[in-house]
Image: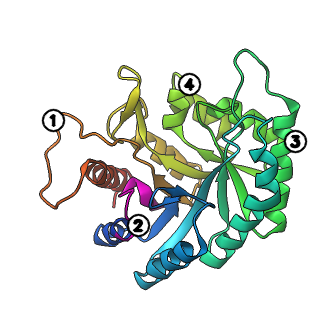
Amino acid sequence: MEIAIFTDEIFKEDYTRALDRAVEWGVKCVEVRAIDGVRLPKVTSDVLDAFITRVRDLGLSISGLSPGFFKCDLSDPEVQTTFDDALPRLCEVAGEWGTDLITCFSFKRRPNEPVPTEVVDRLGMAADKVRDAGCRLVVENVSACWGATGVETGEIIRQVGHERLGLCWDPGNAARGGAEVPFPDDYDTIKDLVDHVHVKNYVPELQGWGLVDEGVVDWQVQVQALAQDQFDRLLVIETHLTERPNGRSIPTAGMNSLEMNTYDNLLATRACLGV
């Protein structure tokens, strides 16, 4: 397993600073969600070109793209626009950037309703479209969508077919989405589906995000289980914690709170991997 970090989880407002930090910290791969506050694929061509040029000049590689597709209601006009325009454009960008992985979501859930068959149908169509363009699609579990936990997302993926659609496993999101024990209970139901992993933690008592080494997810045992299950892909740090937790020492390297927290999460993740 290798470690990647979302660039906008290092520094949101300036991608050059984020990429420079990644190099400073010895990180080789970065994941891309937004560039200077603009989410993919709405970034202009000039900015995309400048971004990938900087990535290559620094010797970094791209682990995947996370544009936020289908984090909306099924009836949203954005869905058809995504199929017609955004998906093809992002697959083209992915190919140019040397990655084949695109992360999406499973549509905004409606309270007290079963998962509509259209969710499965639409995700299957998207997966096929992405595959035809030479990429692969993974769906991330997240609390706002039909696939909030591992169990829920796993059921959707199995209906679509794992050969078509993979899982971006996020145990922190699973905890926020209602899974009382993301590991091992939730994980055991989906471990055969995991193609990508997002690393963050959730503190139920605070109803907020925590550092990797605090919160409901025991990342040490989760990483050990991934290794035992022969997961050999990427752990992508997605800190989500913009405030500095109490009791943490303050580094003197000129980092803001998000940079500090992400660096702490990097050190904790490396410790889990024994590197």
Residue 64 part of the magenta-drawn span: no
**Label number found at residue 179:** 4
* SS at mark 1 in the image: loop
Q: Are marks 3 and 4 in contact (CB under 8 Å)?
A: no
- Circle nearer the viewer, 4 or 1: 1
Disc nearer the start of the sequence (3/4): 3
Q: Nearer the viewer, residue 105 or 271?
A: 105
| Left or right, 50 with reference to 240 | right
User: What quarter of the picture does the C terminus occupy?
Assistant: bottom left
Can residue 33 be spotted in the picture?
A: no
Residue matched to label 3: 121
Q: CA distance from mark 3 to mark 1?
A: 48 Å
Up-down relation of residue 13 to residue 70 (above or below): below
- The magenta stretch spans which residues? 1-16
Classify mark 1: residues with Cα within 10 Å, few (<14), some (14-19) or many (20+): few
Q: Nearer the viewer, residue 209 or 36?
A: 36
Residue denoted by label 1: 247
Nearer-N-terminus badge (4/1): 4
Per the model, the C-alpha gap separating discs 1 and 2 is 29 Å
Q: Residue at x 34, y 55 (%)?
A: 266
Badge 2: residue crowd in 10 Å (few <14, some 14–19, many ≥20): many
Amino acid of disc 4 = Ala
Q: CA distance from mark 3 to mark 4?
A: 25 Å
Q: Residue at x 31, y 67 (%)?
A: 21
Q: Is residue 11 magenta?
A: yes
Determine whether the residue tagged by mark 3 lies in a helix, strand or loop.
Answer: helix
The residue depicted at 17 percent of the width and 60 percent of the height is: 254
Residue 15 is marked as 2
Give the label, 1 or 2, closer to the camera: 2
Pointer 1 and pointer 2: residues touching (CB < 8 Å)? no
